[in-house]
Image (cartoon, rainbow, N blue to C red):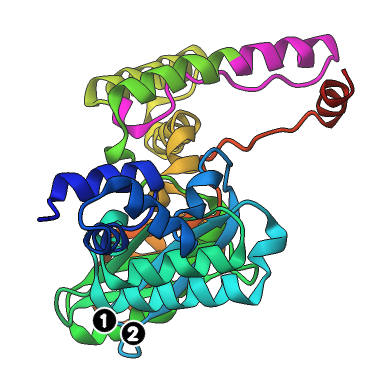
Amino acid sequence: MEVTAAMVKELRQATDAPMMDCKKALVEANGDMEKATVWLKERGIAQSAKKADRIAAEGLVGFKIAEDFSKATVVEINSETDFVAQNEGFQNLVLKTTEEVFATSPADVPSLKATSFGTYFSEAVIKIGEKIELRRFKTLSADDETVAINGYIHSNNRIAVIIKAKCDSAKTAGGLRAVLKQIAMHASAMKPTTLSYKDFDAAYVQAETVGRIEAIKKENEELSRLKKPLINVPMYISMCQLTEEVLAEAEAAIKAELTAQGKPEKIWDKIVPGQLARFIDDNTTLDKEQALLDQSYVLNDKLTVAEAVTEAAKTLGGTAEIVDFIRLEVGEGIEKKVDDFAAEVAAQMS
Protein backbone atom coordinates (compact mmCIF):
# COMPACT_ATOMS: atom_id res chain seq x y z
CA MET A 1 0.00 0.00 0.00
CA GLU A 2 1.27 3.48 -0.87
CA VAL A 3 2.14 5.65 2.12
CA THR A 4 0.94 9.22 1.53
CA ALA A 5 2.02 12.48 3.14
CA ALA A 6 -1.44 12.80 4.69
CA MET A 7 -1.02 9.40 6.40
CA VAL A 8 2.39 10.39 7.76
CA LYS A 9 0.94 13.65 9.07
CA GLU A 10 -1.95 11.85 10.78
CA LEU A 11 0.39 9.40 12.50
CA ARG A 12 2.71 12.18 13.61
CA GLN A 13 -0.19 14.12 15.16
CA ALA A 14 -1.32 10.99 17.00
CA THR A 15 2.07 9.93 18.31
CA ASP A 16 4.29 13.04 18.30
CA ALA A 17 6.96 10.90 16.64
CA PRO A 18 9.33 12.37 13.99
CA MET A 19 8.15 12.42 10.37
CA MET A 20 10.75 9.96 9.09
CA ASP A 21 9.92 7.47 11.84
CA CYS A 22 6.21 7.80 11.07
CA LYS A 23 6.83 7.07 7.41
CA LYS A 24 9.02 4.07 8.23
CA ALA A 25 6.39 2.72 10.63
CA LEU A 26 3.64 3.02 8.01
CA VAL A 27 5.81 1.24 5.45
CA GLU A 28 6.52 -1.56 7.94
CA ALA A 29 2.78 -1.77 8.78
CA ASN A 30 1.73 -1.65 5.12
CA GLY A 31 -0.26 1.52 5.75
CA ASP A 32 -2.14 0.23 8.79
CA MET A 33 -2.34 3.18 11.20
CA GLU A 34 -2.93 1.07 14.33
CA LYS A 35 -0.06 -1.30 13.58
CA ALA A 36 2.21 1.64 12.77
CA THR A 37 1.38 3.17 16.16
CA VAL A 38 2.23 -0.11 17.89
CA TRP A 39 5.48 -0.30 15.90
CA LEU A 40 6.48 3.14 17.17
CA LYS A 41 5.51 2.39 20.76
CA GLU A 42 7.46 -0.88 20.78
CA ARG A 43 10.56 1.10 19.87
CA GLY A 44 9.84 3.81 22.42
CA ILE A 45 9.59 6.48 19.72
CA ALA A 46 6.05 7.52 20.63
CA GLN A 47 6.69 7.80 24.35
CA SER A 48 7.41 11.51 24.20
CA ALA A 49 3.75 12.14 23.34
CA LYS A 50 2.84 11.17 26.90
CA LYS A 51 4.90 14.08 28.15
CA ALA A 52 3.25 16.64 25.87
CA ASP A 53 1.28 18.36 28.62
CA ARG A 54 4.36 19.02 30.76
CA ILE A 55 6.18 22.33 30.71
CA ALA A 56 9.84 22.43 29.69
CA ALA A 57 11.24 25.76 30.87
CA GLU A 58 14.71 24.77 32.10
CA GLY A 59 17.60 23.66 29.93
CA LEU A 60 20.68 25.07 28.22
CA VAL A 61 21.77 27.15 25.26
CA GLY A 62 24.41 26.11 22.76
CA PHE A 63 26.84 28.45 21.03
CA LYS A 64 29.29 27.91 18.17
CA ILE A 65 31.32 30.41 16.19
CA ALA A 66 33.51 29.77 13.15
CA GLU A 67 37.27 30.02 13.63
CA ASP A 68 37.37 32.83 11.06
CA PHE A 69 34.38 34.57 12.70
CA SER A 70 32.34 34.24 9.48
CA LYS A 71 29.33 32.60 11.15
CA ALA A 72 27.86 31.96 14.60
CA THR A 73 24.95 29.84 15.84
CA VAL A 74 22.91 29.82 19.04
CA VAL A 75 20.46 27.10 20.08
CA GLU A 76 18.03 26.73 22.99
CA ILE A 77 16.94 23.29 24.19
CA ASN A 78 14.53 23.06 27.12
CA SER A 79 14.08 20.41 29.78
CA GLU A 80 11.53 20.06 32.56
CA THR A 81 14.07 20.26 35.37
CA ASP A 82 17.42 21.88 35.98
CA PHE A 83 18.63 18.51 37.28
CA VAL A 84 18.28 16.96 33.83
CA ALA A 85 19.93 20.01 32.25
CA GLN A 86 23.09 19.06 34.17
CA ASN A 87 22.93 15.51 32.80
CA GLU A 88 25.81 14.56 30.48
CA GLY A 89 23.40 13.06 27.96
CA PHE A 90 21.41 16.30 27.78
CA GLN A 91 24.57 18.39 27.48
CA ASN A 92 25.77 16.19 24.60
CA LEU A 93 22.39 16.62 22.92
CA VAL A 94 22.75 20.41 23.11
CA LEU A 95 26.31 20.21 21.77
CA LYS A 96 25.40 17.93 18.83
CA THR A 97 22.29 19.94 17.97
CA THR A 98 24.32 23.14 17.90
CA GLU A 99 26.89 21.49 15.64
CA GLU A 100 24.15 20.25 13.32
CA VAL A 101 22.42 23.62 13.05
CA PHE A 102 25.76 25.34 12.47
CA ALA A 103 26.71 22.88 9.72
CA THR A 104 23.39 22.54 7.87
CA SER A 105 21.57 25.87 8.52
CA PRO A 106 18.02 24.41 8.62
CA ALA A 107 15.17 26.87 8.03
CA ASP A 108 13.38 26.14 11.29
CA VAL A 109 12.82 23.54 14.03
CA PRO A 110 10.31 21.39 12.04
CA SER A 111 12.75 21.30 9.11
CA LEU A 112 15.52 20.00 11.36
CA LYS A 113 13.25 17.43 12.99
CA ALA A 114 12.20 16.14 9.56
CA THR A 115 15.79 15.07 8.83
CA SER A 116 17.68 12.01 10.05
CA PHE A 117 18.97 14.18 12.87
CA GLY A 118 15.37 14.45 14.05
CA THR A 119 15.37 10.70 14.65
CA TYR A 120 18.59 10.96 16.65
CA PHE A 121 17.09 13.80 18.68
CA SER A 122 13.94 11.77 19.51
CA GLU A 123 15.94 8.72 20.51
CA ALA A 124 18.16 10.86 22.76
CA VAL A 125 15.07 12.33 24.43
CA ILE A 126 13.73 8.85 25.15
CA LYS A 127 17.01 7.87 26.82
CA ILE A 128 16.96 10.97 28.99
CA GLY A 129 13.41 10.15 30.08
CA GLU A 130 12.03 13.68 30.44
CA LYS A 131 10.19 16.09 28.18
CA ILE A 132 12.83 17.82 26.06
CA GLU A 133 12.07 20.51 23.49
CA LEU A 134 14.25 22.05 20.81
CA ARG A 135 12.72 25.48 21.16
CA ARG A 136 14.62 27.75 18.79
CA PHE A 137 17.89 28.46 17.03
CA LYS A 138 19.41 31.10 14.80
CA THR A 139 22.57 31.69 12.81
CA LEU A 140 24.16 34.97 11.75
CA SER A 141 26.63 34.98 8.87
CA ALA A 142 29.06 37.51 7.47
CA ASP A 143 27.88 38.53 4.00
CA ASP A 144 31.36 39.69 3.04
CA GLU A 145 34.75 40.48 4.60
CA THR A 146 33.58 43.91 5.84
CA VAL A 147 31.08 42.28 8.24
CA ALA A 148 32.25 41.56 11.78
CA ILE A 149 30.66 38.85 13.94
CA ASN A 150 31.36 37.79 17.50
CA GLY A 151 29.45 36.43 20.45
CA TYR A 152 29.42 35.25 24.01
CA ILE A 153 27.94 32.43 26.06
CA HIS A 154 27.55 33.00 29.79
CA SER A 155 29.30 30.63 32.17
CA ASN A 156 26.00 29.06 33.26
CA ASN A 157 25.20 28.11 29.64
CA ARG A 158 21.77 29.70 29.96
CA ILE A 159 22.39 32.90 27.97
CA ALA A 160 24.08 33.30 24.58
CA VAL A 161 24.45 36.37 22.36
CA ILE A 162 25.67 37.03 18.81
CA ILE A 163 26.49 40.54 17.54
CA LYS A 164 26.83 41.47 13.86
CA ALA A 165 28.32 44.76 12.61
CA LYS A 166 28.77 46.27 9.16
CA CYS A 167 32.13 47.97 8.72
CA ASP A 168 33.79 50.11 6.08
CA SER A 169 36.63 47.64 5.52
CA ALA A 170 37.99 44.20 6.34
CA LYS A 171 40.62 45.88 8.52
CA THR A 172 37.98 47.56 10.67
CA ALA A 173 35.94 44.35 10.83
CA GLY A 174 38.92 42.37 12.08
CA GLY A 175 39.86 44.98 14.65
CA LEU A 176 36.32 45.33 15.96
CA ARG A 177 35.77 41.69 16.97
CA ALA A 178 37.03 42.11 20.54
CA VAL A 179 34.67 45.06 21.06
CA LEU A 180 31.75 43.04 19.68
CA LYS A 181 32.42 40.31 22.24
CA GLN A 182 32.30 42.93 24.99
CA ILE A 183 29.00 44.21 23.60
CA ALA A 184 27.69 40.65 23.51
CA MET A 185 28.56 40.42 27.22
CA HIS A 186 26.76 43.74 27.74
CA ALA A 187 23.65 42.36 26.01
CA SER A 188 23.83 39.21 28.11
CA ALA A 189 23.50 41.30 31.28
CA MET A 190 21.27 44.16 30.10
CA LYS A 191 18.63 42.08 28.26
CA PRO A 192 17.82 44.22 25.21
CA THR A 193 14.77 43.01 23.30
CA THR A 194 15.34 44.91 20.04
CA LEU A 195 18.16 46.58 18.15
CA SER A 196 16.91 50.18 18.00
CA TYR A 197 14.02 52.35 19.17
CA LYS A 198 13.06 52.49 15.49
CA ASP A 199 11.96 48.85 15.75
CA PHE A 200 9.27 49.46 18.40
CA ASP A 201 5.64 49.01 17.42
CA ALA A 202 3.68 52.26 17.87
CA ALA A 203 0.87 50.55 19.80
CA TYR A 204 3.38 48.95 22.16
CA VAL A 205 5.07 52.30 22.85
CA GLN A 206 1.70 53.95 23.54
CA ALA A 207 0.63 51.22 25.97
CA GLU A 208 4.00 51.35 27.74
CA THR A 209 3.79 55.14 27.98
CA VAL A 210 0.48 55.07 29.81
CA GLY A 211 1.56 52.28 32.15
CA ARG A 212 4.94 53.77 33.01
CA ILE A 213 3.59 57.25 33.71
CA GLU A 214 0.89 55.87 36.00
CA ALA A 215 3.47 53.76 37.84
CA ILE A 216 5.66 56.82 38.45
CA LYS A 217 2.69 58.83 39.68
CA LYS A 218 1.81 56.12 42.20
CA GLU A 219 5.43 55.89 43.30
CA ASN A 220 5.46 59.67 43.79
CA GLU A 221 2.41 59.43 46.03
CA GLU A 222 4.36 57.17 48.36
CA LEU A 223 7.48 59.36 48.14
CA SER A 224 5.38 62.40 48.97
CA ARG A 225 3.94 60.62 52.00
CA LEU A 226 7.48 59.83 53.14
CA LYS A 227 8.57 63.42 52.42
CA LYS A 228 11.19 62.24 49.93
CA PRO A 229 12.18 63.84 46.59
CA LEU A 230 9.72 63.07 43.80
CA ILE A 231 10.60 61.38 40.52
CA ASN A 232 10.25 63.48 37.38
CA VAL A 233 7.13 62.35 35.47
CA PRO A 234 8.02 62.15 31.76
CA MET A 235 5.69 63.03 28.91
CA TYR A 236 7.18 60.38 26.62
CA ILE A 237 9.31 57.22 26.87
CA SER A 238 10.90 56.74 23.44
CA MET A 239 12.80 58.73 20.84
CA CYS A 240 10.24 57.62 18.28
CA GLN A 241 7.76 59.94 20.05
CA LEU A 242 10.11 62.92 20.05
CA THR A 243 9.19 64.48 16.72
CA GLU A 244 10.65 67.76 15.47
CA GLU A 245 7.52 69.50 16.77
CA VAL A 246 7.88 67.95 20.24
CA LEU A 247 11.55 68.94 20.47
CA ALA A 248 10.77 72.46 19.25
CA GLU A 249 8.10 72.81 21.95
CA ALA A 250 10.54 71.51 24.58
CA GLU A 251 13.18 74.03 23.48
CA ALA A 252 10.63 76.86 23.55
CA ALA A 253 9.58 75.84 27.08
CA ILE A 254 13.23 75.86 28.20
CA LYS A 255 13.75 79.33 26.77
CA ALA A 256 10.54 80.59 28.39
CA GLU A 257 11.76 79.28 31.75
CA LEU A 258 15.12 80.99 31.26
CA THR A 259 13.30 84.23 30.49
CA ALA A 260 11.21 83.86 33.65
CA GLN A 261 14.41 83.30 35.62
CA GLY A 262 15.89 86.48 34.18
CA LYS A 263 18.78 84.67 32.46
CA PRO A 264 20.36 86.89 29.76
CA GLU A 265 19.73 85.63 26.23
CA LYS A 266 23.43 85.85 25.35
CA ILE A 267 24.18 82.81 27.57
CA TRP A 268 21.24 80.65 26.42
CA ASP A 269 23.43 78.81 23.89
CA LYS A 270 25.42 77.46 26.84
CA ILE A 271 22.31 76.32 28.75
CA VAL A 272 19.70 75.22 26.20
CA PRO A 273 21.61 72.28 24.62
CA GLY A 274 22.25 70.69 28.02
CA GLN A 275 18.66 71.09 29.18
CA LEU A 276 17.33 69.77 25.87
CA ALA A 277 19.63 66.76 26.19
CA ARG A 278 18.24 66.24 29.71
CA PHE A 279 14.69 66.40 28.32
CA ILE A 280 15.56 63.72 25.77
CA ASP A 281 17.23 61.60 28.44
CA ASP A 282 14.19 61.82 30.73
CA ASN A 283 11.80 60.95 27.90
CA THR A 284 13.54 57.92 26.37
CA THR A 285 13.51 55.43 29.24
CA LEU A 286 12.04 52.62 27.10
CA ASP A 287 14.86 52.93 24.58
CA LYS A 288 17.52 52.78 27.29
CA GLU A 289 15.96 49.68 28.80
CA GLN A 290 15.10 47.62 25.73
CA ALA A 291 16.93 48.86 22.60
CA LEU A 292 20.53 47.64 22.40
CA LEU A 293 21.95 50.58 20.45
CA ASP A 294 20.34 53.09 22.82
CA GLN A 295 21.42 51.47 26.09
CA SER A 296 24.19 53.01 28.16
CA TYR A 297 27.29 50.90 27.52
CA VAL A 298 28.27 49.08 30.71
CA LEU A 299 32.00 49.62 30.15
CA ASN A 300 31.53 53.37 29.65
CA ASP A 301 28.16 54.68 30.73
CA LYS A 302 28.87 58.07 29.19
CA LEU A 303 28.34 56.42 25.79
CA THR A 304 25.48 54.47 24.29
CA VAL A 305 26.30 51.11 22.71
CA ALA A 306 25.97 52.71 19.26
CA GLU A 307 28.39 55.47 20.25
CA ALA A 308 30.84 52.96 21.73
CA VAL A 309 30.98 51.07 18.42
CA THR A 310 31.46 54.32 16.49
CA GLU A 311 34.33 55.32 18.80
CA ALA A 312 35.98 51.89 18.59
CA ALA A 313 35.81 51.92 14.79
CA LYS A 314 37.18 55.47 14.71
CA THR A 315 40.29 54.38 16.63
CA LEU A 316 40.80 51.78 13.89
CA GLY A 317 40.55 54.47 11.25
CA GLY A 318 37.16 53.36 10.00
CA THR A 319 33.41 53.25 10.58
CA ALA A 320 31.03 50.58 11.82
CA GLU A 321 27.47 50.02 13.03
CA ILE A 322 25.72 47.07 14.62
CA VAL A 323 23.10 45.75 12.18
CA ASP A 324 21.79 42.67 13.96
CA PHE A 325 21.99 40.71 17.20
CA ILE A 326 20.52 37.60 18.78
CA ARG A 327 20.07 36.98 22.47
CA LEU A 328 18.73 33.67 23.75
CA GLU A 329 18.02 33.02 27.42
CA VAL A 330 16.74 29.69 28.65
CA GLY A 331 13.02 29.69 29.39
CA GLU A 332 12.54 33.33 28.42
CA GLY A 333 8.83 33.97 27.86
CA ILE A 334 7.73 30.51 29.02
CA GLU A 335 5.18 30.55 31.80
CA LYS A 336 6.29 28.01 34.37
CA LYS A 337 3.76 25.80 36.09
CA VAL A 338 3.47 26.41 39.83
CA ASP A 339 2.51 23.22 41.64
CA ASP A 340 0.29 23.41 44.71
CA PHE A 341 1.71 20.45 46.63
CA ALA A 342 -0.76 20.76 49.52
CA ALA A 343 -3.73 20.76 47.15
CA GLU A 344 -2.32 17.74 45.32
CA VAL A 345 -1.97 15.76 48.57
CA ALA A 346 -5.46 16.80 49.71
CA ALA A 347 -6.94 15.65 46.41
CA GLN A 348 -5.30 12.24 46.72
CA MET A 349 -6.56 11.80 50.31
CA SER A 350 -10.18 12.74 49.52
Image coords of residue 226 (percent x, y):
86, 15
Label 1 neighbourhood size at 10 Å, few (<14), some (14-19), many (20+)?
A: some
Q: Answer with the quarter of the image where residue 149 lies.
A: bottom left
Is residue 125 in view from this perspective?
yes
Q: Can residue 301 be seen here?
A: no
**What segment is highlighted magenta in the picture?**
215-242
> As shown in the figure, which amino acid type bears the numbered disc 2?
Ala
Q: Which of the 4 image quadrants contains residue 344?
A: top right
Q: Is mark 2 on a helix, strand or loop?
A: loop
The magenta stretch spans residue 226: yes
**Would you place residue 267 above or below residue 8 in this image?**
above
Where is residue 335? Give x, y as percent: 57, 35
- The residue under the point 30% across, 60% down is 25
Q: In this view, does 223 lie to the left or right of 39?
A: right
Q: Which residue is drawn at 79% across and 28% down?
A: 340
Q: Eyeballing the image, is 304 above or below 198? A: below
**Label 1 to label 2: alpha-carbon separation:** 6 Å
Tell me the tag on residue 66.
Answer: 2
Q: Residue 80 shows which numbered tag? A: none
Quadrant holding the N terminus: bottom left
Q: Is residue 87 left or right of residue 208?
A: right
* Kind of residue at badge 1: Ser
The answer to whether the residues at label 1 and label 2 have Cβ atoms under 8 Å apart is yes
Q: Name the residue under label 1.
A: 70
Helix, strand or loop at label 1? It is: loop
* Residue 220 part of the magenta-drawn span: yes
User: Does 298 sit above or below residue 32?
Assistant: below
Q: Residues within 10 Å of mark 2 (few under 14, many from 20)?
A: few
Q: Is residue 301 left or right of residue 273?
A: right
Looking at the image, is 296 positioned above or below residue 274?
below
